[in-house]
Amino acid sequence: MNEPTLPTLHWTRRALLATGTAGALSLLLPPVAAAAPEEMDAAIREMFGNGTIREGRVSVKLPPIAENGNSVAIDISVESPMTEDNHVRRIGIFSPRNPIATIAEFHLGPAAGLAQVSTRVRLAGTQSLRVIAEMNDGSLWSGKASTYVTLAACVIG
């Protein structure tokens, strides 16, 4: 039997120069701007203070794969009866990779009826979003979700 052979690769001078030029130019491009995890933590403290944030009560749903970071659906719900005595005051969405760590802030009250928010956000790439909910008693609760973004948005040059 004949063994299969791999095709040989022939470089032209033009292809070699184009590849080398493209590689050199990519080194000159500015890096994609992104908030560091420390910046996300600072944004959370700026919005909610230094209170203790507990895990739980906040459910965050993102698609497992987002084909385009320009518009990624996010659904948030918080366990709360939304009564005058027990309701969500506000919800914040935070990103460790976007140029600005605070993505959105929503203000709620008992008149909202349900502690749910659905929106679309821009994402600078694959990441885990953190959502913080502040209750009317001042307690802070969090949840998070991850998504794999195949085409990033939020590129600042």
Image (cartoon, rainbow, N blue to C red):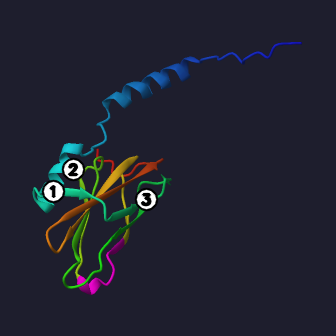
**Which secondary structure, mark 3?**
loop
- The residue singled out by tag 1 in the image is 52
Q: Can residue 124 be seen?
A: no
On the image, the x and y values in percent for residue 21 come to 43, 25
Find the distance from the CA under tag 3 to the CA under tag 1: 25 Å
Q: Is residue 116 magenta?
A: yes
Where on the picture, by quarter, is residue 112? bottom left
Q: Which mark is residue 62?
A: 3
Looking at the picture, does residue 89 appear above or below residue 36? below
Q: Nearer the viewer, residue 139 or 76?
A: 139
- The residue singled out by tag 2 in the image is 40
**Which is nearer the N-term, disc 3 or disc 1?**
1
Looking at the picture, does residue 149 appear above or below residue 79? above
Mark 1 belongs to which amino acid?
A: Thr
On the image, the x and y values in percent for residue 24 come to 38, 25
Find the distance from the CA under tag 1 to the CA under tag 2: 16 Å
Q: Nearer the viewer, residue 142 or 45?
A: 142
Q: Which mark is residue 90?
A: none
Where on the picture, by quarter, is residue 74? bottom left
Q: 5 left or right of 104?
A: right
Find the distance from the CA under tag 2 to the CA under tag 3: 19 Å
